[in-house]
Image (cartoon, helix red, strand yellow):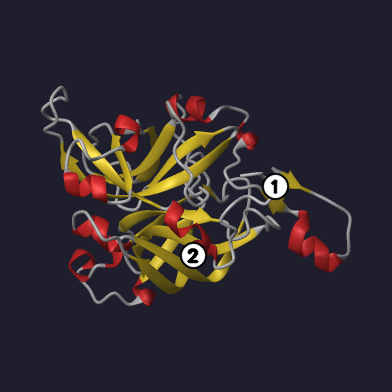
Amino acid sequence: MNVFCTVSFAALIAVCWSTECGDISYAKKSPLELVTSRNESFVFPWNALIKWKFRPIPICLATIVQTDQWTTKSNNSNRVVTAAYCFKRDLTVSISKLDTFQVLVGFDYSAQPPVEGKAYQIKSKKIYKQLHGTEKIKLGVAVLELKEPIMFTEKVRPICVAKRGQKIPDNPLCFMPIYQKDKRRVKDFIAPVANHGNCAIWQDELGAAKGYCIYYSHQTAAKKLGSPLICMVGKKLVQFGIYTTKFNSNYKGTQKASSIGYANDVTLLTSIIAGKLYETDPSSSG
């Protein structure tokens, strides 16, 4: 929620319009109602896209994160997270110079004409790799620093990042966005976590990797790379993973055509994403 207060002008700029991560109370509906309704215009406010600078072609999805989510709860952020494979040379068919890319945030599909988002330039990227899994999993997660901060509004907000070591709740309600190429828009879907996220029943190598396995509906011509795996924790939405790849399920009892998505664990990066982000919530006893 936004918090307004009467203080000095300097302090007003810093803290008065602060924004809580993972909050969509402004929408007046539950996340499940929003995702399953026929309102095609709604999109979670932390969703972002990585695209070419001079071509309107999205490469990956990404997420706005708040570097001080446990402390001052500022009104802006210059950090987004995505899959590191977005910047692999043979994927982007170009030298991965940062000025080649832009980050789009603030989609408003209810506007006429629809707002495709505001573009931000990337200042730096840091890659954090994994030791196990397929190539896309091993390449890991990219933390991007932008040249200017993203100012939070009702339709541009950060997601909460799970605390270090935090696990997805039992019987979770989780979501994952995709980019629909035919409709040229971001759409959120329910993403059931498979077998409590344990991937070892499909592949030993996936079981050794740090991440989650999820079911997702087959969507034709859709981008998923970099998509956040977000789950309800209490009254807030919290990001636990970043989608990096998929594989076919040969496990007994699963449908022959079903695919499993893999999301790298982001809780290992909780302190890295912000630089100074607390690894645990100071207000909690855990």
What amino acid is labelled 1 in the image? Answer: Ser
Spot the residue most to the top: 253
Report which quarter residue 240 is drawn in.
top left
Q: Is residue 104 left or right of residue 15?
A: left
Report which quarter residue 9 is drawn in.
bottom right
Write down the residue under mark 1.
283
Q: In x, y percent, where is residue 259? A: 19, 36
Q: Are marks 1 and 2 in contact (CB under 8 Å)?
A: no
Answer above or below: position of 23 versus 16. Answer: above
Q: Residue at x 19, y 59 (%)?
A: 135
Q: Residue at x 51, y 47 (%)?
A: 162
Q: Nearer the viewer, residue 281 or 184?
A: 281
Q: In x, y percent, where is residue 184? A: 33, 46
From the image, which quarter does the N terminus lie in?
top right
Instruction: Judge the density around disc 1: few (<14), some (14-19), many (≥20) Cα neighbours within 10 Å.
Output: few
Spatial CA distance of label 1 from label 2 is 20 Å
Write down the residue under mark 2.
272
Q: Is residue 213 left or right of residue 274?
A: left
Answer above or below: position of 29 versus 122. Answer: above
What amino acid is labelled 2 in the image? Answer: Ile
Q: Which mark is residue 18?
A: none
Q: Nearer the viewer, residue 276 or 94?
A: 276
Spot the residue most to the front: 286
Q: In x, y percent, where is residue 10? A: 82, 68
- Residue 181 visible in the snapshot: no
Q: Earlier in the sequence, mark 1 or mark 2?
A: 2
From the image, which quarter does the C terminus lie in?
top right
